[in-house]
Image: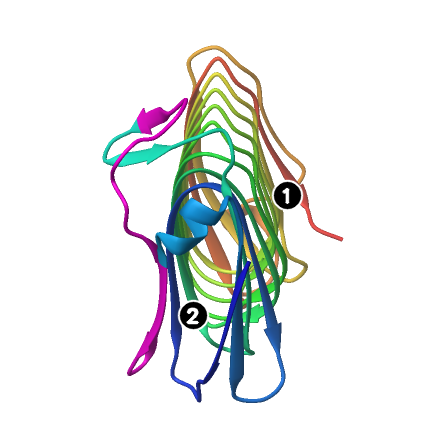
Amino acid sequence: MAEHSFHTPLPLTLDVSVPAGDVIVETIDGEQSTIVVEGDERLVEATRVSHDGNRLVVEYRDRKPFGLVVQIGNFYWGNDGIRVRARIPHGAAAKLNTASADLAVDGRVGALDVKTASGDLRVRGEVENDAKIKTVSGDLELDRVGAELSVNTVSGDVRVAAVGGASEVRSVSGDIRLESLREGRASFTSVSGDVEVGIAQGSLLDVDAGSTSGDLSSEVALASEQSGNGDGPTVVFRAKTVSGDVHIFRAA
C-alpha cells in the first residue's frame, strides 16, 4: 500500500488512469487531498501519484506484462487489479480513465469525465457542472448533474436522478431512465433498450420521438396543448429508438 497527501486548494482536477480494479473518490471539507493505492506490490510501485499545479495525477505507467495477463489497448495487468482511494476537496473535478474498473464517487465534484471499457459507475451526491461519460459493458447511476450530461454506453443501463441542463444519451443494449429534467435539449438514441424520462414540475414539454419497434407514451401534455401563456422552462425532447419503448412522465 502507498499513501500520498498533498495541499490542494481549488481549482483542482483529479486525473486517474489505471487499468483495472476499483476507483473510489470521496469529496471532503478543507484543502487537503489523500491518495491511497493498494494491490499487488509490483502494480503499486508502477503507479505514479503526483501533484502538478491544478492537477492531482494517479497513473499506472508500466506497460510490461507479467504472469497471467489481460490486454486492452496499451494496458496490461495480472490477476489483481489496483484499488485507488482518493479524498479530495468539495468542488474539485474528476477525470477517470480505466480499462476495467468499478468507479464510485461520493460527495460533490465540480465536473466529471469518465472513460471505461468495462465497469460500473456510481455517483452519490452531485456533479455541479458537466458530466461526460463513455463506457462499454457497465451500468451508470448518478444522483444529480447540475449542468449538461453526455453519455455514450454499450451494454449497460443508465439511471440519473436529476439533470439541470441539456442531456444527450446514446445507448446500445441498455435501458435509459432520467427521473427529472427541468430545461434544455434532451436527446436520446437507443438500440434495444427502453427510454423513460421525467419532466420536472412546472416545466413545459416539446417532444419529437419515434420508435422502429416499440410503444410511445406521455403523461405530460405538450407545451402547445397547455392553457395559459406557456411561461416556464421548456424541455425539448428528441428520441429515436430501435426495439424499445419511450415513456415520458411527470416527475414527483
> Is 88 a magenta residue?
no
Binning the other alpha carbons within 10 Å of mark 2 as few (below 14), some (14 to 19) or many (20 upward) gives many
Count residues near mark 1 (Cα–Cα under 10 Å), then give few for <14, some for 14-19, many for 20+: some
Task: Name the residue nearer the viewer: 219 or 131.
Answer: 131
Which of these two is toward me, 114 or 76? 76
Please report the residue visible at 48 percent of the width from the left and 20 percent of the height from the top: 173
Task: Indicate yes or no whether the magenta region holds residue 67.
Answer: yes
- The location of residue 149, given as percent across then percent down, is 43, 53
How many numbered circles are shown? 2
Q: Amino acid at mark 2?
A: Ala
Q: Residue at x 53, y 85 (%)?
A: 32
**Upstream in sequence: badge 2 or badge 1:** 2
Tell me if I can see residue 5 in this picture: yes
Query: Residues at badges 2 and 1 in contact (C-beta under 8 Å)?
Result: no
Q: Quadrant of the N terminus?
A: bottom right
Q: Amino acid at mark 1?
A: Val
User: Compared with residue 107, is residue 204 higher up or lower down, i.e. above or below?
Assistant: above
Q: How is the image coloured?
A: rainbow
Of the numbered discs in the image, which one, if any, rests on residue 220?
A: 1
- Is residue 186 among the parts visible in the rendering? no
- Which residue is label 2 attached to? 93
Tell me which corner region of the image, top left, top right, bottom left or bottom right, holds residue 143: bottom right
Position of residue 233 measured from the top left corner of the image (x, y, whole percent): 51, 65
Does residue 133 appear left or right of residue 251 in this picture? Answer: left
Magenta residues span 48-71
Question: In this view of the protein, which residue sits in the foreground, 189 or 26?
Answer: 26
User: Which disc number belongs to residue 164?
Assistant: none
Is disc 1 placed on a helix, strand or loop?
loop
